[in-house]
Amino acid sequence: MAAPALRVLNLTCEYQRHPLGVQTRAPALSWELRSDRRNVRQTAYRILVSDDPKQLSQNVGRLWDSGKTTSDASIQVSYAGQALRPARTYFWKVKTWDNQGGASEWSAASAWQMGLLAPQDWKGAAWIAYDQLPADRVNVLPVDGAKDTYRDNNTLPLLRKAFTAHQQPARATLFISGLGQFEAALNGQKVGNHFLDPGWTKYDQLAQYVTFDVTNLVKSGPNALGVMLGNGFYYVPAVKERYRKLKSAFGHPKLICRLALTYADGSHEDVVSDLSWRTAASPITFSSIYGGEDYNAGLEQSGWATAGFNDRKWRPVVAVSGPPALVAQQQEPLKVFDTFAPKSTTAAQPGKWVYDFGQNASGIIELQVKGQRGDTVRITPAELLSTDHTVTQKNTGRGFYFTYVLKGSGVETWRPRFTYYGFRYAQVEGGVPRGEANPKGRPEILNLTALHTRNAAASAGSFSCSNDLLNRTNTLIDWAIKSNLASVMTDCPHREKLGWLEQTHLMGGSLRYGYDIATLCRKTLADMRASQTAEGLVPEIAPEFVKFEWGGDMFRDSPEWGSATIILPWYVYQWYGDRQVLAENYAMMQRYVAYLGTKANGHILSQGLGDWYDLGPKPPGVSQLTPMGVTGTATYYYDLTILAQIAHLLGKTDEAKTYEQLGAEVKTAFNAKFFNPQTRQYATGSQTANAMAVYMGLVAPADKAAVIENIVQDLRTRNNALTAGDIGYRYLLRVLEDAGRSDVIFAMNSRTDVPGYGYQLAHGATALTESWAALPTVSNNHLMLGHLTEWFYSGLAGIRPADGSVAFNRIDIRPEPVGDVTSAKTSHLSPYGLIATDWKKSATSFELTVTIPANTTATIYLPAPASARITEGGQPLEKHPELESLGFAEGRARIKAGSGTYHFEVGSTL
C-alpha cells in the first residue's frame, strides 16, 4: 500500500515532545507536514485532545475537538478546549488538509502532562532542610569585591522518606525542587539522567521544579525516596583556598517535593516533603559551583535510599521557608554528552600527573581508582598549562579542584554531582596512573575520563564546506557554544558561569541555527523579568547573582546588554513564531526603554562598556576604537524600532506611535552627534561605528553605500584584519553579508597571522577564546565573538529567513560561493521542517540541491548571468510550472519555489 502523500509528524507541545510539567493553561501545539509532492501548503487542520488514550484512538476529543479549521497554522496553535487540570496527562493528535485536495491520516498520538499550577497543587508539601542559615547571614545580592565577614563550610545533606504503595501504581510522577541542586533516588535507583537540576534562578523571587515519570521505579509495598542536595548558586560556601567569584547566600540547601501516585482503580495517593522525613550528612564534604567538590567515600551509608535502610540514627528535618514562587523547569536539562579519554598522561613534577584530554570543554571528571581506606586523590582541572607543564588556573579562578577520599573496597568509581568546570587538562595528586612506578603504594588511578556536560538542547543544524580553516573555525565556535549552554547562557564555564545578556541576542543567530534553544530563551527572559529593578534597569547579567560595583555601574548598566529585554523576545518571535513571548515580556520592555530615557542626555546614551574587547592599542576591555555613546545609542534606537513593531503586533497602536516618534528623535540626535557628512563616517570611522549605524537603520539611504564602502576600505587598509569587538562584530558581518560582500567576510576570516579565529586555532585553541588574540591571561572557552557561525549558515550556505518572515515561513536561499570555497553542505531544522542546501561550483558550472519544507515558500537566488542556461532536474525551468522565474538581478537568477527538493544546474562560468 502506498504511503499517503501528506503526513503529519513530530508533534510538539510547548516546543517539546511528550513534555512533563507543562506550566501554561493554554499550551502551544505544533506539528510538521511532510509530502512527496511539491508546493504543498496546509489549508485546514483538526486537533483532538483527550484525557483517555482509548477514546482518542476512536477519534473522540473529550477535552477539545477543534473541528476542521480553515488555517495554514501548523505551529504555535493554542489549546482552546476544556480547562486543564494540574498533574494530569492529556493525549492529542492532528489531521490536516492541503492546497492540492489531499488529506493526511491522523498523526500518531502524542501526550503532555500538566505541571502544578497553584500552591495548593503541591498537596501540603513543605520546604524542609538539614538546618537553616541564620537570617543575618542571608545575602541575596552580594557586592563583588566585598570582604568576607565569616568562613563557613555547610553540611550537604541526604534526606529520605519511607512509604508504602498499596498496589502497583499505574502512574507515578515526582515533582521536585532541591536547592541549590539535587539528585533524587527511588529504591536506590537514580531518578532520570539530568545534571545540576533545577535551573539557576533569582531565588529570592522564584525557583524551578522538575517533573519525572517514575512509574517504573515505584513498586507495590515498601518504597523509599531519597534526595541528595548540593549548593549550586543558592549557597556559595566561604572556605579558604577555594575559589569564589561571588558570595550568594540565599539559604542552606532545602527540598520540596510531591510524589503523585495514581492506581489502576482510579484512586490517588501523594507522598510529600514534610516533617516526617529524616536527614543526615552526605559523603559530600564540600561543594561549590566555583570551588569544586570533595567526597569522602568512607562516609557512605549503603542503601540509604532503599526501603530497608535503618535511619534511626538520622535526625528529623527542619521546616524552612523557600522561594515565594515555584515554576516548572521549562528549558532542557543539563546532561552528560561527550566522553574524552586522555590523549596523554605526563609526570609534570614528582607526584603531579597531568592528563591531556585534547579538548577544552565544560564538564566534570570520572575517576576509577583502587587503594586503601582514607587515601586521598586530588584532581585539579584547567584550560592551560604553566611553563613548568603543571596546570594553571590563573585565568579561570584559582582554587577549583575535586577531592576523593577512598573507602578501600576494591575498584571505586566516582564523579562530582553538583559542580563543573571548563578544562582540557586535569592534574592528579595523591595517586599514580596504572602501569607507572609506585614505590610509595599510592592509590592506583585505573582510569580518568572527562565528561562533557551541557544543556540538552537538540541539534538543529549542520555545516561543512570545502575549506578546512572554515570547518575548524565552525568546530572551534561550536565547542564554546556547547560549553556555555547551561540553564543560562553563560559567558564561560569556569571563572564566572554568569548569564551575561549581550550574547543572548548577538550570538543568538549562531546559536539558533545550530541548536533548538527556544525553551532556553524563554527561561532567559524569565530571568530578566526577575532581575529587573524597580527603576526599570535590567542588569547585564540575569539571574543577577552579584552586583558589580567596580568601575561604577559600567558592569551593571550597559544598554547593549540590557537591551536583550527587547531584542531577544523579538528574535524569538521571528525565529520560532512565538507571539506569546512578546505579550509576556511587553511590560518589561516598556519599563526598560523608559529607564533608558532617564539616562539619556539629549537622546544619547554614553554609559556602559561599549564595544567590549575590540582590538585597539591597549589590552582588551572597555571599547577603545569606538567612542562611548555610539553603540549604546544605536542600540537604544534599535530597541525603539523593535518595540514599535511589537506594539503594532499587540494592537497597541498609540504606544507604537509614541515609540516611532521617540525613535525618530534619537535618530536625529545620533546623526547630529556622530555622522560626518563630508567623509560619510560615523564617529571615529571604526568598523563597529559604521556597521552599527547601517544595521540599525540610522544611515540615510543616500549615504548607505558610501558608509558601507568605508567599512570595506577600512578592512582593506588593514589587509582584511578585523578590529570590531563583542558588540560590533556581529553587525559588521550582517552589514557586509546584506550588502553582498561575503567576499570581504571570507578574506577577513581566512587569516591565521592576525588576531581572529584562524589565529586562535594556530595557537592551539580548541574552543573559542575570550580575546581575539587567544590571550592566556583570560578565558579560553568563551561564548562571545562566535558570530561567524551565523554567516556560515546564512551567507556561505545561503539559508536565510526572508524579510518579514516568521519562523521561516518564507525563506531566502542565497548561497555565497566566495574565495576558494568550492562546495558547502548545510541544513537547519526550522519550526516547519528541514531546510537544506548543498552546492558545488567548478570553473564552468554551479549546482545547488535545496530542500524546502512543506507549508513554506522560498526565493532561490542562483549566482548566474542573464545568459546562463539553468535547469532543474535536468530540465529547463520552463518545463517546471511549479517554479516561477522572477528574472535576473545583481548577477543572480531569482526563482520562486514551494516545498520540495530541487536540483538546479547553472551552465556558465562563475
Image (cartoon, rainbow, N blue to C red):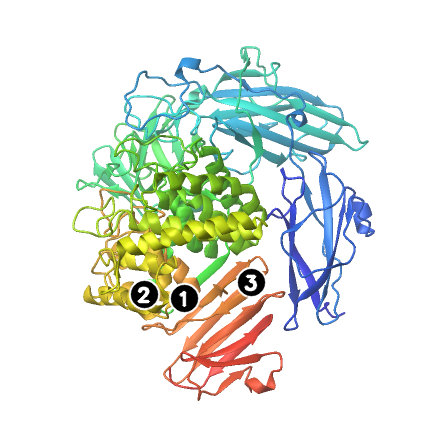
The image quadrant where one finds the C terminus is bottom left
- Position in image of residue 543 (x %, y %): 43, 34
Q: CA distance from mark 2 to mark 3?
A: 27 Å
Above-or-below relation of 357 to 352: below
- Most foreground residue, 852 or 385: 852
Picture quarter with the N terminus: bottom right
Identify the element where label 1 is drawn. Answer: helix
Residue at the spot of label 3? 834
Residue 215 visible to the viewer: yes
Front residue of 451/203: it is: 203
Question: What label does residue 745 carry, if any?
Answer: 2
Whichever of labels 3 and 1 marks the residue nearer the N terminus, that label is 1
Residue 276 in percent (x, y) is at: 62, 14
Earlier sequence position, callout 1 versus callout 2: 2
What type is the residue that disc 2 sits on? Answer: Ile
Whether residue 458 is visible, yes or no, is no
Q: Does the residue at mark 1 contact the one at mark 2 (Cβ under 8 Å)? A: yes
Q: Quarter of the image holding residue 212?
A: top right
Instruction: Residue under label 1, please give it.
Output: 795
In the picture, residue 8 is in which quadrant?
bottom right
Is residue 778 found left or right of 455 in the rendered image?
A: left
Picture residue at 42% right of the left edge, 55% below the top: 510
Question: In the image, 803: left or right of 263?
Answer: left
Task: Give the residue type that dot 1 points to.
Answer: Gly
**Which sits in the foreground, 702 or 71?**
702
- CB-based contact (under 8 Å), mark 3 and mark 1: no
For the point 22% across and 42% down, which residue is it? 777
